[in-house]
Each structure stands twice: as structure tokens, then as C-alpha cells.
Image (tube, grey):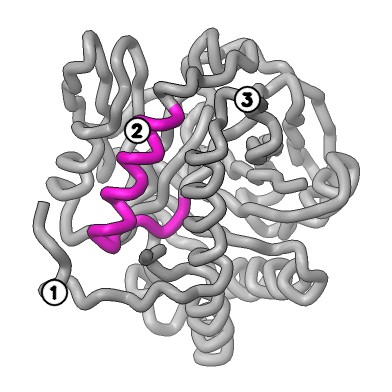
Amino acid sequence: MRFMVIVKANAESEAGVLPSSEMIAAMGRYNDELIAAGVMLAGEGLRPSSEGARIKYENGKVTVTDGPFAETKELIAGYWLLDVKSKEEALEWIRRIPFTDGEEVELRKVFEASDFPVDAISEEHLKKEAAWREATQKPIRH
Amino acid sequence: MRFMIIRKADAETEGADLPTEELFKQMGDYIEEMVKAGVMLAGDGLKPSREGARVKFHNGQPSVIDGPFAETKELVAGFNIIDVASKEEAIAWVKKWPPLDGHGEVEIEIRPLYEAEDFGDVFTPEERAREEKMRAEMAAGTGNAVPEGQRPSN
């Protein structure tokens, strides 16, 4: 099953403070472990919300608001997408992230096609979706 | 430049409601349009936060709290990664979001992703090489899915 591991923002990530070379190296080693185990599907870092925007839809109207956004600890600073056997395995991997102080991550299960009622998705749509995922999402392997 | 499109959660995504057949069709058409335009890199829907957890690190020590989490409108319900020429182009794509989603009441956040060149000298040549290798493997799809039973255990 696939899980999204969401790294929550903090004052430093929102200020655009870049990680030290030691942190980059530690994260690189951690990612290598994920890759060697065949569980890593993707991983990215997000730039501060000051460079982003929010788009709200209400009664058919679209409103765009430029960042930054205030509620820092609810924002996202990065994520991994993992493919593991269980929530427990995902948590085991998360415990080993080389974070040191105050960081918070959120673990969320990803919907699979099989989670939806058979008649909710057409056969054609399922095929398209499967082909697209086949082309974009595979475990990264050395 | 790459953007993450974050579909914020609401009472329905945090509840037990699944999308209707019509919404699946609309969302499928929207994603297909982005795939055909060559901008779509990834996308997924997240299950309600009650099936998830939070892990907090203090002095390097993790502590785990199980979901659900209360602040619904700050949670994530789904995401796409797109590769476009500008923030304006990203917003133009987001404006075409399927109107049936959230019954037309939806909030989306877009955020640019960090690229290797953003990190300067702290991103050493050695780490850059490792990252490039990883991304090349990802882009080439050289990874072959390893059956669960055959994965190395930790």
C-alpha cells in the first residue's frame, strides 16, 4: 500500500532557510536506504508558501490569493511517497528520518483504484489510469 | 518549473464519501488533458486523516500520534505535480479544476518545488551526483516493482 509522508513546515522552511550540507548528506543516505529497499516512489521539497498561491472556488467563482500563508505549522515543506506493506512499516521508516528537533511529519494513506466501488469508475478510465501510473510511478532502484 | 497542486481537505474528504461516477469522469478528463499537454508528472488522492498518523521529532526522538486530525481545512486531500513554464501557467491549469469536485466549493494551494540549483554550494557535487542518479532512474522508470515478499527487510 502507498503512503504519503508529509513534512510539515516550520519557521525555517517558510523563511527559505536551506539545509546544511550535513543535513543534505544525511537525507541523501536515508533516501538511498529507501531506494535500496525498493519502497521509495517519489520525494520532493517545497519552496516557501511566499512563492505559492491559493485558489478558492465558490459558487463558480475563482479567487486567487498569493502567499505567504500564516498558519506555518499546517503548511507543507516536503513529502515522500512510499510503497510499503503496512502502516507499521511506514512508521518504521519515518522513525529513521534524520530529523533532529521539532520537525513534524504526517503519514497519510493513498487511495488505490480498488478502494472505489466497481461501478464508480469506467473500465476505460481504469485502463488509462493504470497505464499512466505504470509510466510515472515505479519504485526507484539503483 | 515544477509545482505541487494541493487539494485541501473538507468535511466530505475527511468523512466517508467517495467521488461519484460523474466526478471520476470529470477528473479523468482533466488529468488526461494535462497528460496530453505534457505537464502532468504525478497525482494521487489521500485517504481520510483517521487512517493516518503524525510523527513528531524532539531531540531526534520520534513520537507517534494516530489520526484523525481536527483542523480539516488545513489537511491535504490530494495532490498533483505539474511541470509548467510559470506560476501563471500553473494557476491557469488550476482554474480549470473539475467544477463537480467539492460541489464547486474547493480550495487549492500551489507551491513551487525545490530544484537542485536552488541549494548552491551546500549541495555538494557528491550529493548532486547521488540525486541526479536517483532522478534519472525515476524518469527512466528503470525501477522494476519488487514483489512484496522479495523485498529486503529492514
Does dot 1 land on a helix, a strand or a loop? helix
Q: CA distance from mark 3 to mark 2?
A: 30 Å
Q: Which residues are magenta?
A: A24-42
Residue situated in front as seen by the camera: B144 or A79: B144
Q: Which residue is mark 3?
A: B121
Does dot 2 land on a helix, a strand or a loop? strand
* Chain letter, disc 1 residue: B
Q: Which residue is pictured at 46% across the width and 40% down the height?
A: A79
Q: Which residue is mark 1?
A: B150
Res A18 quadrant in image? top right
Q: Are marks 3 and 1 on the same chain?
A: yes
* Figure check: A67 above or below A7: above
Q: Which mark is residue A106?
A: 2
Q: Which residue is pictured at 17% across the width and 17% down the height?
A: B61
Q: Which residue is pictured at 40% across the width and 31% down the height?
A: A25
Give the amino acid at mark 1. Gln
**Numbered disc in front, either 3 or 2:** 3
Q: Disc 1 vs disc 2: Cβ atoms closer than 8 Å?
A: no
* Chain letter, disc 3 residue: B
- Where is residue B146? Give x, y as percent: 25, 75
Image position of A24 (left or right of B55): right
* Figure check: B80 above or below B29: above
The answer to whether residue B126 is magenta is no
Q: Are marks 3 and 2 on the same chain?
A: no
* Figure check: A23 above or below B115: above
Does dot 3 land on a helix, a strand or a loop? helix
